[in-house]
Amino acid sequence: MSGDPYLEVTDLSVRFPTSDGLVQAVNGLTYSVELGKTLGIVGESGSGKSVSSMAVLGLHDPKAARIEGSIKVGGTEVVGLAEDKMRSLRGNSVAMIFQDALAALHPFYKIGAQLGEAYQVHHPKASKKEARRRSIEMLERVGIPQPDRRVDDYPHQFSGGMRQRAMIAMGLINDPSLLIADEPTTALDVTVQAQILDLLQDLQKEFNSAIVIITHDLGVVAEMADDVLVMYGGRCVEYGACKEILTHPEMPYTWGLLSSVPDVTGDPNARMIPIPGNPPSLLDPPPGCAFHPRCVHSSKVPGDLCATTMPELTVGARQGHLKRCHLVDSETIYATEVLPEVAPDLAIHLAEENR
């Protein structure tokens, strides 16, 4: 969270008017990512992770979404940018790997045709032969066997892991400086997941790209991320260096996420501790802290502050570590009350894994 960021998101809000009212999908979100660095955005479904990242690519219908704040990609302001200029950025300076590769790839077009089209959109003078050569090159780079033959296959002829690799190849075909990966390992077995994450890390070293990885899997975050942004109810509730967040979390929601992770290093029969209750409605969010109806530690805060007053995002016990919580001595509470309830070495294992 230092140096010159390639992606700067400042006070971003995304709202969707509906017949039932205004859906407050993202509220006051601020973060940044430098070239060569990875930001992990974590949170439950409906926390605003994907909505905020789609705003970076200008993928929301301006007639259906109200977007406020600032998004700068390589110094270019994206919010309010004309569609033709946004199109020149999308897929070129910034690209996205979508969660469901089978849905993202067109079933009636060959893999090579889809990669070639992505290349020719930003290289209009390139011939079809050149686009095909580039497609084969990218398939080879992401580890597709026999790329000169598989380039003529259809998406259904690829396995789930190979389709995800093809999506990565499409995202990287124009050498973007920013890559957004939305749940890139969802529905893949653990071996393929590890291969995809290793591939992203190798390609990042090769291209020096900035990566935003959206996930609910803290194991993925531990392996990939330099910084972590925890979202809940459309807001940032914790933000800091990956190791700090995993070893010294200061927000009860983050504690809940860590407690929900199975410990593969310890007792195989150890019980996972779920977060009680359900995520808040973004149509009618609760007053005060959005997490307080589910927070078992809100009673430690004097009065009804958690229920009535939204906490500000403030510096925690460590410099550069931000939290949105009214708890004063959250570090001590985590160490004495929360950590003993889960596998004691789990957070440290996550933070040190592959780092």
Image (tube, grey):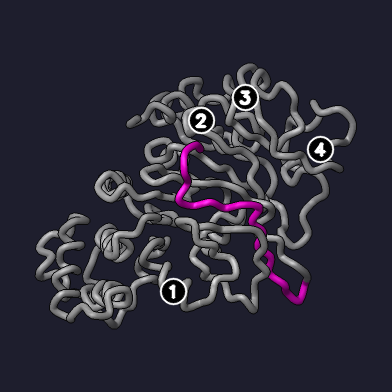
Circle 2: residue type: Leu
For the residues labelled 2 and 4, the Cα–Cα distance comes to 24 Å
Of circles 2 and 3, the one toward us is 2
Residue furthest right in the image: 303
Q: In the rendered image, which residue does mark 3 sit on? A: 338
What is the distance, in whole Å, between disc 4 and disc 1 at their CAs?
A: 43 Å
Whole-number angstrom distance, CA of label 3 to CA of label 1? 47 Å
Ranked by sequence position, the earlier of labels 4 and 1 is 1
Up-down: is 295 above or below 177? above
Label 1 packing within 10 angstroms: few (<14), some (14-19), many (20+): some
Closest to the camera, between mark 4 and mark 1, is 1
Of circles 3 and 1, the one toward us is 1
Q: Position of residue 201 (x, y in %)?
A: 30, 44
Which residue occupies 64% across, 56% down?
Answer: 12
Amino acid tagged 4: Cys
Camera-side mark, 2 or 1: 1
**For the C terminus, which image quadrant?**
top left
Q: Nearer the viewer, mark 3 or mark 4?
A: 4
Which sits earlier in the primary sequence, circle 2 or circle 1?
Answer: 1
**Mark number, residue 87:** 1
Q: Is residue 138 magenta?
A: no
Estimate the spatial distance between the alpha carbons at disc 2 and disc 1, rounded to whole Å.
37 Å
Cβ–Cβ under 8 Å for marks 4 and 1: no
Q: Which residue is mark 4?
A: 306
Badge number at residue 202: none
Say whether residue 160 is visible: no
Horizontal and vertical percent position of residue 150: 15, 69
Q: Quadrant of residue 24?
A: bottom right
Q: Amino acid at mark 1?
A: Arg
Q: Which residues are magenta?
A: 1-20
Element class at badge 3:
helix
Q: Residue at x 78, y 70 (%)?
A: 21
